[in-house]
Amino acid sequence: MNKEYLNNIRRLLQFVESTQAETIDKVSEICAEAIYKNKLLYFFGTGHSHMICEEPFYRAGGLACVYPILESIFMLHEGASKSSIYERIEGNGAVAVAESGIGEGDVLFVISNSGRNCAPIDAALEARRRGAITIAMTSLKHSKSVSSRHPNGKRLFEVCDFCLDNGGEPGDASVSLDGIQQKIGPTSSVIDIVIINTVIIGTVERLLKKGVKPPIFISANVDNSEELNSDILKEFRTRVKLL
């Protein structure tokens, strides 16, 4: 068994713990305050980053006030290479965010490992224009090694209010093997999922301190889950269209 990938993940988890704790705590407080004021947590990402948007949504142990912005043109199932073209076109990300209904006091997480393409940058800019707080989830090492593809010349971490750094290498893949030029074993999805679940836990902790009972789903595959989940769905279905 090749342990290099596992060791890389362990190293990046240590990186998150040692360098991102303060930002995670701050973002958790921001999310708790937004939920306390009856706002929503939005998530936007293109390509494989859309998986990070799905992770906290309708999840066992997850918050019901999560709104993933899942536009087909940015996802892989309707044409993987085509999605790469759409994410580079200026304006598409802004339209997706505008259509979501995000507004003053909401929070938008924008996930992009490179942070260089138009869609995530436009998503963040539109959300800020509408009064939302923006959180970039990216690899600063990767993003700082490339130029922006946006006409304004800025990368995602430069247009968001806060930045959560997953510590990944440029190109994301992390394992080299003799006989091939390309690296394998991408790390961004694993680390981003850990980061977002850590933020959710911190958010719930802070809500409880405020005396607020957070709307948390339990697994539909355990006994007696239907009654609790149905009450939560009834409350949020009109606000989160994908529910």
Image (cartoon, grey):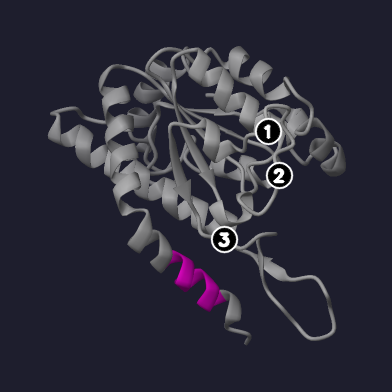
Mark 3 touching mark 2, by CB under 8 A?
no
Mark 2 touching mark 1, by CB under 8 A?
yes
Per the rendered image, the range of residues in magenta is 6-13
Q: In the figure, residue 162 lies in which quadrant?
A: top left
> Label 2 belongs to which residue?
147
Q: Nearer the viewer, mark 3 or mark 1?
A: 1
Q: Amino acid at mark 1?
A: Gly
Q: Residue at x 46, y 72 (%)?
A: 10
Distance, label 2 to label 1, CA atoms, is 7 Å
Q: Residue at x 83, y 75 (%)?
A: 181
Distance, label 3 to label 1, CA atoms, is 22 Å
Q: Nearer the viewer, mark 3 or mark 2?
A: 2
Q: In the figure, residue 14 lies in which quadrant?
A: bottom left
Q: In the figure, residue 5 lies in which quadrant?
A: bottom right
> Label 3 belongs to which residue?
168
Q: Is residue 234 above or below residue 14?
A: above
Numbered badge on residue 153: 1
Q: Nearer the viewer, residue 220 or 140?
A: 140
Distance, label 3 to label 2, CA atoms, is 17 Å
The kind of secondary structure element at disc 1 is loop
Asked if the magenta segment contains residue 100, the reply would be no
Q: Residue at x 54, y 73 (%)?
A: 8
Q: Nearer the viewer, residue 28 or 159?
A: 159
The picture places residue 21, in percent across and down from the top left corner, at 31, 53
| Number of residues whose C-alpha sits closer than 10 Å to that of mark 3, classed few (under 14), some (14–19) or many (20 or more) | many
Q: Residue at x 44, y 55 (%)?
A: 194
